[in-house]
Image: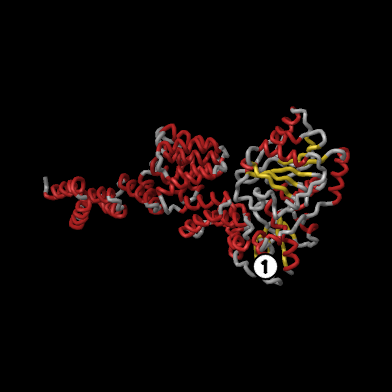
């Protein structure tokens, strides 16, 4: 045995059996002398990796690679080490070297897809994974990657199948359970997601991602205190994890517990000042508590929450002009943009009259379905279709560009400033049209109902079933459909129960807003969940009972605690507490014997 081999054997023995630091020091010293010796560099790479010195490991492997050109095993080790450091570009560079040598290398192609996925280059990730004609039967990691790419492309059922296959191959790989659970959340299968996350937790009780996912699904199920308990379990493992701190703060926001929310909010924001989802949740809690001076300062964070920003079609075109809006001169050329959903667009239009009175040179973009509504209601020909200015060179005409919600801070600084009972007007000819049609029911109470939210994320979480509304169908009422979307199954069910739902099959309730408003104006009462029609009813001044989940920071405009909305004086808000059936029972008691409803003193 040579002298060098003896030295290496002694170093390995020192490292394994005597003192790791001494062994590491000795191999580094030896490598300075034998800079191009493959055996020395190999031992250095192994020991440095065990010591957690990834940079030293990579450098030693690179030195070997200079001697052993085109060694695929070495390149594979190097790119995987770069992946552990999240050095994605360096990892990709080494994978591409492998694919130059062996263009059909399965593992490199698969991991290239994964790196593009991590870099959010989803089309490139898709191309790479499609280059593998068939995944190896035992490659659970490959199934996970295919599932992740399908999930990002919103192919949820396909993604679900991939994750399920990954679990069949390796029942101990926790990431598969987390990915499958997230997929089920997107499919709004909360109970199934919880069970999957629980399976992952039973494999590894200290997996932080699994604990966070368990907390998330409990939070969505309104099991807020249970969610906080799980998040705290994760926090004990990582006390400065910003995501956990943020989620706990959001939970306390949903509970309406400002002091606790503030503690975790400040800890989380200190770590990540750009957590816009948390800022928005904290802001909406304060709005709900009528603390307007504090909340409006954070309200623009709603525009930067990723899922919201994607829906704001003009955001990238106007973002450089958006946030310098604390002072706007009354004579400035001002462009106001619509918000992401038609419901919030109606909500914020409650300040349009104030805006018109204060600013001289304004244009307001609106959903094309609302242009005629607004021009009529505010008696100003200043409303144009969404994108008319913001998506053209005409935007240069404006000194200030602001989303509608960002204008509210100028006019709603205290509770007393919310004084609107109604602020949009329906067309008289359409009111008269539906009045004539419904005249045969004049002896009955005209009650409109809407039970689903369709276009919002997690819409089914705030939706009910037509079956829930069944007790409202009594002989002294005509129940009128205001539910947009496909309701054929609902109509069939009501018919089988020998109940009568008055529908207007020629009326497109989602797109023909003018006619929908004309119909709403003929109701004695509207009973609904939180959807865009609820906002129209509120803005028209229609007496409305709104049913919504008891706890949600999202609905800062519905106050389930006192049963009111300061944005719409004519809406009575009922939170679902014991059960939906008990809530409907309560509504029946309110409606019984009344033919005039005034909720303005809630």
Q: Position of residue 512 (x, y in %)?
A: 76, 47
452 left or right of 134?
right
Please say which color scheme the image uses.
secondary structure
How many numbered marks appear?
Answer: 1
Residue appearing at x 70%, y 71% in the figure:
330
| Residue at which label 1 appears | 398
Please tell me whether residue 359 is drawn above or below residue 468 in the rendered image: below
Residue appearing at x 74%, y 43% in the figure:
527
Q: Position of residue 16 (x, y in %)?
A: 21, 45
Camera-nearest residue between 3 and 423: 423
Camera-nearest residue between 582 and 467: 582
| Mark 1 neighbour class, 10 Å CA radius: few under 14, some 14 to 19, many 20 or more | some
Camera-nearest residue between 19 and 218: 218
Residue appearing at x 69%, y 66% in the figure:
334
Q: Position of residue 323 (x, y in %)?
A: 60, 64
Tell me the quadrant of the picture where the N terminus can be found: top left
Q: Quadrant of residue 157?
A: top right
Q: Position of residue 308 (x, y in %)?
A: 59, 53
Secondary structure beneath label 1:
loop
In this orientation, does residue 261 appear?
yes
Camera-nearest residue between 44 and 378: 378
In this orientation, does residue 132 appear?
no
Q: Quadrant of residue 457?
A: top right
């Amino acid at each position: 045995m040579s002298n060098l081999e003896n030295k290496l054997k002694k170093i390995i023995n020192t490292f394994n059996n005597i003192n790791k630091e001494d062994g590491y020091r000795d191999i580094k010293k030896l490598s300075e002398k034998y800079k191009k010796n493959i055996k020395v560099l190999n031992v250095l790479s192994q020991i440095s990796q065990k010591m957690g010195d990834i940079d030293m490991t990579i450098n030693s492997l690179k030195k070997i690679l200079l001697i052993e050109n085109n060694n695929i095993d070495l390149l594979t080790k190097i790119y995987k080490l770069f992946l552990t450091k999240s050095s994605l570009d360096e990892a990709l560079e080494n994978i591409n070297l492998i694919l130059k040598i062996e263009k059909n290398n399965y593992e490199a192609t698969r991991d290239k897809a994964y790196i593009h996925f991590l870099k959010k280059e989803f089309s490139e990730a898709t191309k790479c994974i499609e280059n593998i004609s068939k995944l190896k039967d035992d490659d659970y990691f490959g199934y996970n990657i295919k599932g992740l790419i399908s999930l990002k492309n919103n192919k949820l059922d396909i993604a679900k199948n991939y994750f399920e296959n990954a679990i069949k191959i390796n029942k101990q790989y926790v990431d598969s359970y987390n990915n499958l659970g997230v997929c089920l959340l997107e499919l709004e299968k909360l109970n199934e997601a919880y069970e999957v996350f629980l399976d992952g937790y039973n494999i590894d009780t200290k997996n932080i991602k699994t604990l966070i996912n368990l907390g998330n699904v409990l939070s969505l199920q309104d099991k807020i205190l249970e969610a906080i308990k799980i998040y705290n379990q994760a926090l004990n493992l990582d006390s400065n994890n910003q995501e956990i701190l943020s989620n706990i703060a959001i939970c306390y926001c949903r509970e309406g517990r400002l002091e606790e929310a503030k503690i975790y909010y400040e800890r989380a924001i200190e770590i990540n000042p750009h957590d816009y989802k948390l800022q928005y949740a904290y802001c909406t809690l304060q709005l709900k508590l009528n603390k307007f001076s504090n909340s409006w300062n954070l309200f623009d964070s709603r525009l930067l929450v990723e899922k919201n920003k994607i829906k704001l079609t003009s955001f990238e075109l106007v973002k450089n002009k958006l946030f310098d809006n604390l002072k706007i001169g009354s004579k400035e050329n001002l462009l106001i943009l619509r918000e992401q959903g038609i419901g919030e667009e109606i909500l914020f239009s409650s300040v349009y009259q104030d805006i018109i009175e204060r600013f001289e040179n304004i244009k307001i973009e609106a959903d094309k379905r609302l242009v005629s509504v607004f021009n009529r209601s505010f008696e100003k020909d200043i409303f144009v279709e969404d994108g008319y200015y913001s998506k053209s060179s005409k935007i240069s005409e404006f000194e200030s560009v602001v989303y509608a919600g960002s204008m509210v801070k100028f006019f709603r600084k205290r509770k007393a400033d919310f004084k609107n009972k109604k602020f949009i007007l329906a067309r008289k000819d359409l009111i008269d049209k539906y009045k004539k049609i419904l005249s045969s029911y004049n002896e009955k109470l005209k009650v409109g109902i809407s039970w689903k939210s369709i276009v919002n994320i997690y819409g089914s979480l705030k939706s009910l079933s037509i079956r829930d509304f069944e007790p409202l169908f009594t002989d002294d009422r005509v129940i009128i459909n205001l539910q947009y979307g496909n309701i054929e199954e609902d109509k069939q069910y009501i018919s089988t129960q020998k109940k009568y739902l008055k529908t207007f099959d020629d009326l497109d309730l989602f797109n023909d807003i003018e006619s929908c408003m004309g119909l709403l104006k003929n109701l004695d009462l509207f009973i609904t969940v939180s959807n865009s029609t609820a906002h129209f009813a509120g803005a028209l001044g229609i007496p409305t009972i709104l049913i919504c989940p008891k706890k949600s920071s999202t609905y800062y405009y519905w106050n389930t605690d006192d049963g009111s909305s300061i944005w719409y004086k004519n809406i009575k808000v009922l939170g679902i507490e014991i059960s939906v059936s008990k809530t409907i029972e309560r509504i029946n008691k309110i409606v019984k014997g009344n033919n005039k409803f005034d909720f303005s003193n809630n």
